[in-house]
Image (cartoon, helix red, strand yellow):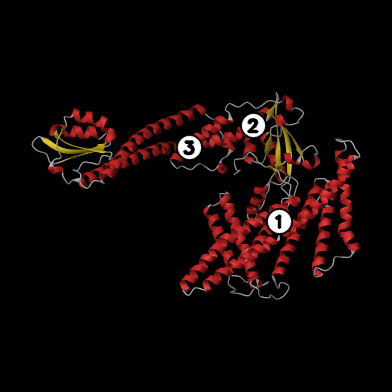
Amino acid sequence: MIFPQSMIRLSAVILHKSTDAVTRALLNAGVIDFIDIRKTEFSLSGHLTAIDQELGNSDVCDLRNRIEQLLKQANITLPLTSTLDADSLSPVDAKQIVIQIETITAQIRDIRIKQKELQHKLNRKNEILRQTSLFEKIDESPPADSGVKIRTGIILKSRKEGLAKALSVYPAVIHFANATESEFPAVLLYMKRDEERISPVLDRFCWQTIEFPSELSGQKDQIADKLNSEISELKDKQKSLRMSAENIIVNNAPSLRESWKNLTITKHYIKIQDSFGKTTDTVLFTGWIPRNKQRQTEKMIKKATAGNCYLEWSRPEKDSSVLPDAIPVKLNHGSFFKPFQWIVENYSLPQYGSIDPTIIVAISFLAMFGLMFGDAGHGLVLSLAGATIAFANGKKQNTPFMLGRLIFWCGCASIITGILFGSYFGFAFFPPLWFDYHGIVLGHKGSGLISDVYDILGITIRFGIIIIGSGLILNMINRLRSHQYLGFLFDKGGILGSWFYAGGVYTAFFFVNSNYKSFPPAHLIAIAIGIPTLLFALKPSLEFFFEKRKEHDFKPALLLDWFMDWIVELLELFSGYLSNTLSFMRIAGLGIAHVSLMSAFFQIAATIESGFISLVILILGNILVIVLEGLSAGIQSLRLNYYEFFSKYFRGSGKVYQPVSLRRK
């Protein structure tokens, strides 16, 4: 688990008649990260042609997207690709699918046009209602800046129903008073912008304009009720139209889902065959497979071809022509390590064959966070918050889900260190199992090995030395595995760099333990620092003779260049390792800041007489500390891993393992 999963390359030759069966089997297995064999250095690659496809991948994707958009309008979920089976693949009738999609789309388009017209009327009637509500009485003349037009008149009884029906297609409202023997007094409200459309209708039905009739005076509420009733009716029609559109999709959903499933399988089917190359009688393909899937894959291909195939397996460790950057990388960790694998992948994917630091990052990240945020109560809050975020996102494996799980484990780390430090929301409910962090920061003399703030700083310095030392060891392992023996000896993180760092650490601790009065004896300094310093002088010349001699000729001026390279190398070594080590003091700094903030809120609460207000201040203070210090501790843990730890050994730029599979997320 400390290295990416071992991969092996398959090169296969099958007969034409087996192409379909093999493609289906490979799609169901979903383990091969294919390489386009026509672009490889395979001896026949220049003579290979592509597999003929009746339907292009872009056409398939377009049809899938159109079906997805239709189903989304009716909130119909798509099948999980993991439930699909390549054996159910059938020829795609693209013409029939297009006809079905366009028929549904046309029906929905007609409904959308009606919805748009209804919405237009609804907006106008809402505006009439809004502006009418501003009038004290309906019989008053509207203000000049009002958009509503009010007209009063009389209409013959025989023309009343016709006028009402004709006006119903416009955003207007008409209210009739009690009729006389042959006429109805009426008041009509509409938007001024509709004047040109409504006036001809009134003329056609012989509308006679009159002064505002007394029998219509004071009927503002009745007119408003009528408007509300008409608005409600329009909304019901809108809802009915929307449901009609959804019902069209729902009625066609079974066939649309089946088409989508077949298109999805076809998409992956085409993607596999796009990597194939063919000759007159055979088909060839190649790709990378996890080594533990070799036997299963070989058995599956032989079954699909009835044994009529040729399979060649190539291990990258035994083929110097295969560059590590070309080999796909698969990190395979359990549930606990997934958030920390996410942290590593956000930095970069490890190169194939190099160290996968996920497990080490899990330990170092949680240790750093716990030391900076050591409070069991605050940790409990973080764990609950993280669990809530992760639970709310189900098992989507997205960023919020991973972040929620990371917060949960960080909270657990804080609970453990909080118990060790005896801190529970800033209170010492129980005695510490290790040392009283709060008491020491506040000036109380501790007992045992940790008695003051300098001892806390010393813990973080030692922690940093362990982390940096681990990085140097991992770098040397990487160098040996990649056969970079010169780098193994002379790299900053190699044997000499580690020797130099160890000598510097020894010298610094000797000086501190002597109360800053003396250094180690001269012969020990010579062994610890002097010898690696002198040996580093050989690095430029050895690099020239072993790596650059073919490109450049030796010139006396190179001696000066080598001397300057040596000086610069030593300066970088000294300043780099010193700053890297001291950088871990920020762990103590954040821990001290955490205690200081809590202490400040306790002091503020103590100065206030009201017990309720004091409690509120303590609660708000704890919330602020959890948010502010939790965020700071997370950022600093990430920074120390990325810049102080990864920089010592990490080899990124790995290629992601992407098998063509229906099961792959």
Question: In what element is the residue under mark 2?
Answer: helix
Name the residue tied to disc 3: 69
Residue at the image point whose x is 82% and y is 66% from the top: 510
Name the residue tied to disc 1: 360
Confirm whether residue 286 shows in the render. Answer: yes
Question: In what element is the residue under mark 3?
Answer: helix
> Gap in Å between the C-alphas at discs 3 and 2?
27 Å
Considering the image in quadrants, where does the C terminus appear?
top right
Name the residue tied to disc 2: 273
Q: Nearer the viewer, mark 1 or mark 2?
A: 1
Query: Contact (CB < 8 A) between labels 3 and 2?
Result: no
Among the two numbered marks 3 and 2 on one chain, the one whose residue lies closer to the N terminus: 3
Q: Residue 452: where, in percent of width, then height?
A: 70, 72
Establish if 362 lies above or below 204: below
Q: Residue 4: where, in percent of width, then height?
A: 72, 48
Question: Which of the pair 469/276 is nearer the observer?
Answer: 469
Q: Residue 226: where, in percent of width, then height?
A: 23, 43
Q: Is residue 109 left or right of residue 504?
A: left
